[in-house]
Amino acid sequence: MKIVVYGLGVSALAALKSLKNKATNVSVVNTGPVDDWKHVALSISSDFKLYSEEDSLTAFLQADYIILSPGIPRSINYLEEAHKAGVKVISEVEYAFMNSDVPVIAITGSNGKTTTSTMIADSLKAFGKNVFLGGNIGHAYSEIIGSSFDFAVIELSSFQLESIVTLKPLISIITNITPNHMERYKSLEDYSEAKKNIYKNQDKGSVVITGVELDTDLKQIKITPLKDFDFKKSKLVGEHNKLNFFCANEVCKNICSNYSADVFQHFIDSFKAPKYRLEFKGESAGKEFYNDSKSTNIESTLKAIEAFPCAQELTLIIGGKLRQDKVDEFKVLAHKNIGQIIAFGESASNISKILDVNKVDTLDDAFKRILKKSKNIILFSPGFPSFDQFKNFEERGEKFNKLFTKFCDETIK
C-alpha cells in the first residue's frame, strides 16, 4: 500500500507519526522547497520520500491513496488529476477512522462546536467513560491509532468533512450552519453540504442531534435550550450555553447506561469554558476580562455579546484577517448599543468605514486604549481569522492573556 501525505500541519504530522513503521511506502508532499521543510518529515522517519508541490503529481499517481491536510482544498489541479486516475483522496479524519475501532461521537457546526465537543467529552467522563477528545480541537484524531478508549469525541470542520468516505459516527451533532469560509466555498449550499457529510454513513434510525433542518431518515433530535436543570452555579455566561448543555445531555442519555440527572447537574455546576471560548480571565481595576479568541465570524461575536445583559457596559475588541474586502455583516454591531468598539489588525480600516470604532494596529495598541477609556467588561471576540498577525487563534488568545496579566501588573503598581 503506497500512501502520500499532503501537508505538514498538526493533523498530517499525527498521521505521519502513525505511518513511520511503514515509511518505505510513504511519501510527503508540502508547499515550498523541500529543503525548507524536510527536517520536519525526516525527524519522524528518514525513509519518507519527499516531493515539492511542483513534483507532487509524480507521487500522487503512484499512490493508492492520498491523506489530505484539512487546509488544502481538493480542487487543486494535481489532486483532481490523481482522483480521476483512480487514486483515493481522503482526509486525515477518514484515515484515523479507518485505523481505529473506537466508537465516534462527531460534532460540527459554524459556531459552538468546540464548547459542545468539550462538554460532551467531559460529561461522558463524569459518567466514568474513558474518552478521547480531538479532531479540530486539541489532539489530531490520528493520535488515537493504537490506543484504547470507550469513546472518541471528534470535532470536525467543513474542511475535514470534505474528504469523508467511510466515517460513521455513533451519534453526530450539527450545532448550526451559517455563512463561513466563503473564501473556500462557492456558496452557502456547498459549505452546508460539506458539513452534512458528518452523517452520510450513519445507519438508518441512528441519531443526529441538530440545530438545522435535515433531509435524512436518521432519528433527528432538535437542539433546544436544556430544561429541568439548575444553571445558577454554572460558570458559563450566556443563554446559548443551554443549547450546548442540551447536546451533551442527549449524548449521555443515549449511550450511558448509568445515566443520572443528578450526575449531569453536578457536571453543569462544575464545567468551565474551553480555553479561548468566552473564557473569563479575571477582574482588574473594576473591569472583567473575557477571552473569546476562537471567534472567527460575526455570528460567534454576536453570541458572545448576547451573553451579557447590558451591551453598554462592554468594550468589544474585534479584528483580524479579512476574508474578503467587504465587512458589511458587521454593520449589525451599530445597533447593539455597545459602549466602546476597538478594531485592530488587517480588517480595522474596513471596519472603521462602517462603524464608529477606535482603530488600532495591534492587540497591544487595543490594551492601551483600554487604559485610557473603557467600560466594565472587556470582551475580546475578534470575529475574524487570526492569520494576519498570528499563526492561529490559540496564539492570538495567548497574546490576549499576556496583555491581561500585564494590565493587572500595571494596575497594581
Image (cartoon, rainbow, N blue to C red):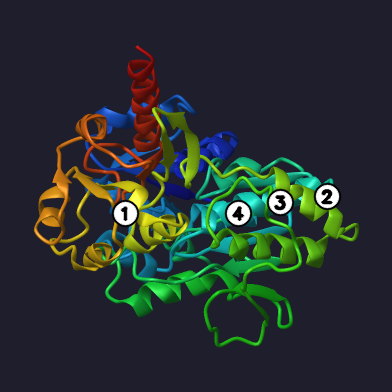
Residue at (19% x, 32% y) in the render: 365
Q: Distance between the residues labelled 3 and 1?
A: 27 Å
Residue 352, x across and y down, in percent: 12, 54
Asked if disc 3 and disc 1 are in contact, CB closer than 8 Å, the reply is no
Q: Which of marks 1 and 4 is in front?
A: 1
The relative height of residue 152 versus residue 397 in the rendered view (above or below) is below
Q: Dot 1 surroundings within 10 Å: few (below 14), some, or many (20 or more)?
A: many
Mark earlier in primary sequence (3, 4): 4
* Residue under numbered circle 3: 268
Numbered label attached to residue 383: 1
**Label 2 is placed on what type of residue?**
Phe
Q: What element carries label 1?
A: loop
Q: Nearer the viewer, mark 1 or mark 2?
A: 1
* Residue under numbered circle 4: 117
Residue 46, located in which quarter of the rendered image? top left
Q: Is mark 3 on a helix, strand or loop?
A: helix
Asked if disc 1 and disc 2 are in contact, CB closer than 8 Å, the reply is no
* Residue under numbered circle 2: 127
